[in-house]
Amino acid sequence: MNEKNIVVVGDVMLDEYWNGTSTRISPEAPVPIVDGISVSHVLGGAANVALTSRTFCSKVTSLGCVGYDNASMIITKKMTENDVKFNFSYSYENKTISKIRIMSDNHQLVRVDHGNISYPYTNKLENTPDVIIVSDYNKGTIHSEYLEYLMGFDVPVIIDPKGTDWFKYSGAYCLTPNKKEFEEVYGEFSVDRALMTVIELDLQGILVTLGADGMTWVGKGGEIISLDSEAKEVFDVTGAGDTVIATFASFLHEGVESAMRKANRAAGVVVGKVGTSIPIYEDVVEKVVFTNGCFDIIHSGHIALLKESAKLGNRLIVGLNSDKSVERIKRKPINNEQERKVVLESIEGVDEVIIFDDDTPIDLIKELKTNVIVKGGDYTVETVVGHDIVDEVVIFPTLEGKSTTSVIDRIKNDN
């Protein structure tokens, strides 16, 4: 968890789920009858953004408008339970925004929306955060004057926009619309139109989520970053936009591309679940496992090491000595570096193979922000290059008689 302080301003909501089963059709109308109802509540809208941000950041404050009602009591209780600070504006004329979803066997049958915000949010920030998120659902919490106030802070202001009046967001760091929201304002999505939007609204960039096509960032200088979707199965897109903006903002300090990759990964997790949900830290923040070697002739010892290495994190990267490097430290390789790379990439659990030309992989280890290094049993922790800059070093026992040298010796002896 990072030490960033995030403030989330926007339309705070409560998502209520009526879960049951349906085996009969009503005699009164051609609709299903739902039996055995159980009711559950989760934070929605800007409250969901705040809760997701708290998964990654040490301090998160939620600002918004609610009524004096049961829904606001449930929201504040859940905020307190999850250590999310809040500073809400209460009014008897407000009815806390709520969405009731009636579900049958995890399938949504109908959604009922109710609540209203009569007065926008006007409370001042208690201190200057690292990032400000504006979660605008166009329910009445956000207004132009307050946006101008937020833009006065010398921190990134990241906005999930709604409606067609985007000029009120001018001067923000970036907007995070989905494709439909973008096209309702600017027409069919294209990089050129996205760049025009960035320039027109004086943004640093725009991050457009494209559903099954992933997401694209277009920066003020014309830089483009596109990522494919990481969703393995799309079950429910509820709250996906909240997840993207919360995760992106939480990791913006690492750079736009790194923040995008984590947001993309987080969105891929939540759309595979039923209803409004939040990602788990370990599913989003990579634990990079690294091992390296010549891997000249792959044998069962290599396979065992790589399979065990893959279990230690969620990304296994193999550093592969180049032909020149192998020749300097050992001998002329039997198989060239490209052949060795192709074989390694075909092994289950290996996510990436990077060829390096140095005698040691220390620069690569630093560049990859490696968490765990795995080496064979002929090493000790202290003799592993990079042991002092990673979280963990794992020594995998060498399988007796399994080495490239022994394979080469057997071939020579057979001849």
Image: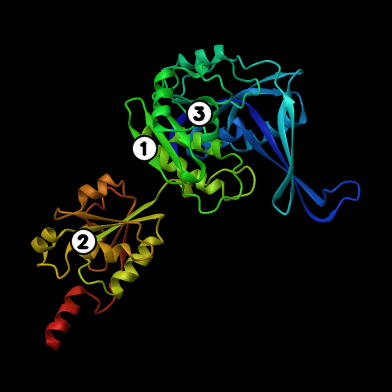
Image-based side of 231 in relation to 369, left or right: right
Graded by Cα atoms within 10 Å as few (under 14), some (14 to 19) or many (20 or more), the crowding at tag 3 reads: few
- Tag 1: amino acid: Ile
| Residue located at (31% from left, 46% from top) | 369
Q: Is residue 373 above or below residue 263?
A: below
The reply to whether dot 2 and dot 1 touch (C-beta < 8 Å) is no
Q: Nearer the viewer, residue 150 or 163?
A: 163
Q: Quadrant of residue 191?
A: top left
Disc nearer the start of the sequence (3/1): 3
Q: Amino acid at mark 2?
A: Gln
Mark 2–mark 3 distance (CA, rounded to whole Å): 45 Å
Q: Circle 1 — which element?
A: strand
Are the residues tagged 2 and 3 within 8 Å (C-beta)? no
Residue sitting at 34 percent across and 71 percent down? 304
Residue 55 at x, y percent in the picture: 52, 40
List the residue tagged with mark 3.
187
Residue plotted at (54% across, 53% down): 233
Q: Earlier in the sequence, mark 2 or mark 3?
A: 3
Q: CA distance from mark 2 to mark 1?
A: 28 Å
Q: Position of residue 328 (x, y in %)?
A: 8, 61
Outermost residue to the top: 145
Is 18 placed left or right of 178 in the picture?
A: right
Q: Quadrant of residue 383?
A: bottom left
Q: Callout 2 environment at 10 Å: few (<14), some (14 to 19), or many (20+)? A: few
**What is the CA distance from the residue labelled 3 to the residue labelled 1?**
21 Å
Question: Is label 2 or label 3 in front?
Answer: 3
Mark number displayed over residue 338: 2
Pick the front one: 341 or 130: 341
Q: On the image, numbered disc 1 is attached to which residue?
A: 225
